[in-house]
Image: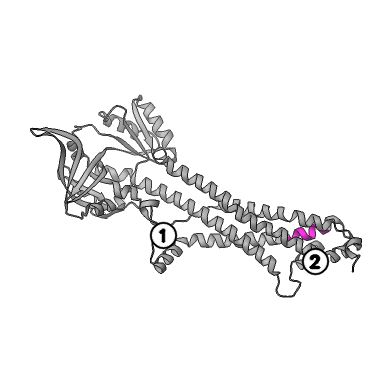
């Protein structure tokens, strides 16, 4: 009973004039449209956030945070560089590796891949690939045994399984009486891994670093050092600082540079989708204009009576501003609730639709992952809610101003 009369009148006018419910049909339509627009925007941005987070996690499970390589070829004195790296604050691990292109064959199957020579004991401290193995173990990679671990998709393309023998061809020739022949070696498949990213599952094979050294005839040299850092986001600065400490002459890289196009395209897509879907919210918000104009037209005589009783233009404006704000609050709050609810259960909903339709919506060959992750970020939700409510508030200005300018004599002339 202590509420301002502008609030009481605004909520009363928002009710249906035909006694068909608490809110008029047109008001419910505005709220529903605003709710769907806000919910869709939250779900889409949550999917983009989840995709970026999942992509980053999977990349860091397979690749190192940073790499330090020789500028003009293999890294010969890598032991000194490794000792310096391990003594640098923020560097968790520094492991040598050999990486080069190779061709794998089994029977009639042929596939190109990136061959990576690793030390099984040190590899676990640099990346989490050892936890992604479906079969076998990194410990099966024994020096001189010529064992190999394949990505799941690469093994399927070769038709290989655990225990099979495959032939590895190196793009380096060996002189023979019949001419230059590519160097080759038979390996036994002892493990399969699945990183969740098709790029690596199809194009990466692991062997022991000593076997790779013999195959590529590098001696004691390695391709470079792979660094694991306490904070992956500091990789560009840390690897640059380490190269300067070592006196320069290194080619440095990090995970943000190697996959910059992925994350840049995600950010660009996220910004574009926000702008495009915000137009849907704007259309729903500006439906409030039509709703309030209709109410103002219907309540002309009521407004005139209020004016004759001493209600000022500012009070009339407040009455109709209350209606627009209430519609906006209901639409934004319900949209946020629906968007967060759908986003948190999106993966389950997608899997249910896939089982229902018998179709797989995401092809890992195209989207790098087969799931649709969603990650709700509070800042995104607040930004969407604030912008949507601001649009609703702006939409109430014209109808409320028009109601405030109603002339009592003109409105009551025909009554």
The tally of labels here is 2
Span colored in magenta: 316-323
**Which residue lies under the disc numbered 1?**
361
Task: Decide: few, some or many residues near mark 1? Use Cα within 10 Å; few <14, some 14-19, many ≥20.
Answer: some
- Which x, y percent locates residue 117? 24, 41
Instruction: Kindly report the secondary structure that dominates the magenta region of the rendered protein.
Output: helix
Image x and y of residue 313, in percent: 85, 56
Quarter of the figure with residue 4: bottom right
Q: Position of residue 268 (x, y in %)?
A: 51, 44
The answer to whether any part of residue 3 appears in the image is no
Helix, strand or loop at mark 1: loop
Question: Who is closer to the viewer here, 20 or 212?
Answer: 20
Q: Is residue 316 visible?
A: yes
Q: What residue do we see at 16% from left, 38% from top?
A: 183
Q: Residue at (51%, 62%) from the top-left corner?
A: 342
Q: Nearer the viewer, residue 125 or 101?
A: 101
Mark 2 to mark 1: distance in Å? 50 Å
Residue farthest to the top? 247
Which label sits on residue 218? none
How would you rate the neighbour count of disc 2 (Cα within 10 Å): few for under 14, some for 14-19, many for 20 or more?
few
Position of the C terminus, as image quadrant, is: bottom right
* Label whose residue precedes the other's in the sequence (2 or 1): 2
Q: Secondary structure at mark 2?
A: helix
Residue 298: assigned label: 2
Residue 413 falls left or right of residue 402: right
Residue 367 position in % (x across, y down): 40, 52
Res. 371 image quadrant: bottom left
Q: Please tell me whether residue 101 belongs to the stretch shown in magenta.
A: no
């Amino acid at each position: 009973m202590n509420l301002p009369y502008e609030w009481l009148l605004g909520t009363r006018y928002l009710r249906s004039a035909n006694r068909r419910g608490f809110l008029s049909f047109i008001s419910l339509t505005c709220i529903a449209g605003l709710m769907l627009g806000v919910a869709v925007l939250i779900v889409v941005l949550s999917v983009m956030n989840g995709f970026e987070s999942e992509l980053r996690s999977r990349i860091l499970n397979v690749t190192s945070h940073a790499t330090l390589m020789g500028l003009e070829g293999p890294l010969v004195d890598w032991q000194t560089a490794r000792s310096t790296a391990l003594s640098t604050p923020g560097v968790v691990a520094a492991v040598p590796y050999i990486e080069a292109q190779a061709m794998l064959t089994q029977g009639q199957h042929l596939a190109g891949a990136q061959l990576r020579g690793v030390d099984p004991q040190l590899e676990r401290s640099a990346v989490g690939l050892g936890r992604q193995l479906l079969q076998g173990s990194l410990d099966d990679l024994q020096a001189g045994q010529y064992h190999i671990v394949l990505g799941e998709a690469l093994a399927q393309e070769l038709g290989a399984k655990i225990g099979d023998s495959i032939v590895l061809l190196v793009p380096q020739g060996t002189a023979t009486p019949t001419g230059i022949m590519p160097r080759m070696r038979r390996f036994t498949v002892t493990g399969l891994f699945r990183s969740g990213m098709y790029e690596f599952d199809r194009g990466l094979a692991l062997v022991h670093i000593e076997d790779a050294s013999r195959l590529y005839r590098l001696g004691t040299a390695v391709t470079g050092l792979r660094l694991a850092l306490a904070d992956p986001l500091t990789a560009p600065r840390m690897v640059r600082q380490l190269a300067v400490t070592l006196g320069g002459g290194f080619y440095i890289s990090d995970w943000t540079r190697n996959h910059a196009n992925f994350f840049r395209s995600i950010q660009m897509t996220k910004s574009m989708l926000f702008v495009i879907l915000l137009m849907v919210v704007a259309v729903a918000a500006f439906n409030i204009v039509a709703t309030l104009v209709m109410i103002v037209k219907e309540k002309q005589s009521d407004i005139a009576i209020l004016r004759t009783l001493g209600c000022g233009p500012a009070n009339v404006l407040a009455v109709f501003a209350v209606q627009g704000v209430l519609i906006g609050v209901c639409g934004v709050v319900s949209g946020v609730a629906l968007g967060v609810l759908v986003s948190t259960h999106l993966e389950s909903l997608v899997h249910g639709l896939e089982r229902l339709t018998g179709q797989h919506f995401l092809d890992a060959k195209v989207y790098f992952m087969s799931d649709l992750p969603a990650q709700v970020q509070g800042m995104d939700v607040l930004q969407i809610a604030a912008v949507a409510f601001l649009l609703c508030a702006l939409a109430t200005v014209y109808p409320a101003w028009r109601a405030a300018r109603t002339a009592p004599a003109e409105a009551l002339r025909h009554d």
